[in-house]
Amino acid sequence: MICTTPSPSSMIAAGVSHCRRATVRFNTVALPDLVAALESDDEWLARNASLAIARHGKSAGDFVEQLQCTVAHPNRYVQANALKALQRIDTPASRTALIDALQTSRWCPITTPKTPY
């Protein structure tokens, strides 16, 4: 019996191919659930959901309204990820939402001496 070990490059290629398939499935299936998770009371869930949505870029374009509401989330990291998602969606509606949010955020009500970051 002859055992062969796949080369690192073939293993990487197989992994990339698998990741691409998983990402396509993820894009079409998970976005509505991720958007629903933005309203969770669990800050980590909302934070991770907003980060995942930001990573989707243009494929999250149907959720600009929900992201615009998320910009007012009490967690600043969720806010930042929502802004990043709006930037990466890059449609006229998302750019308008992004500019509106940035214009009203000059004075951050969350930042206090106790919570500077």
Image (cartoon, rainbow, N blue to C red):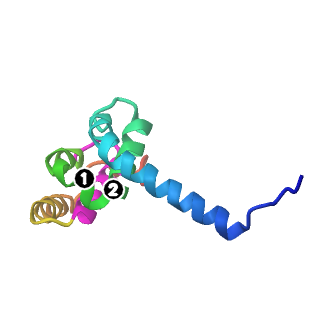
The answer to which of 107 and 5 lies nearer the viewer is: 5
Regarding residue 112, the answer to whether it shows in the image is: no
Magenta-colored stretch includes residue 74? yes
Query: What stretch of residues is rendered in magenta?
Result: 72-89
Outermost residue, bottom direction?
A: 9
- In the rendered image, residue 88, in percent from the top left (x then y), is placed at 27, 64
- Relative placement, left or right, of 73 versus 48 is left
Residue type indicated by callout 1: Ala
Q: Name the residue located 41 percent from the left edge and 52 percent from the top edge.
A: 23
Q: At numbered mark 1, what does the secondary structure look like: helix, strand or loop?
A: helix
Location of the C terminus (image quadrant): bottom left
Regarding residue 89, the answer to whether it shows in the image is: yes
Residue type indicated by callout 2: His
Q: Name the residue located 32 percent from the left edge and 35 percent from the top edge.
A: 37
Disc 1 designates what residue? 60
Q: Are marks 1 and 2 in contact (CB under 8 Å)?
A: yes
Disc 2 designates what residue? 56
The relative height of residue 110 versus residue 15 in the rendered view (above or below) is above
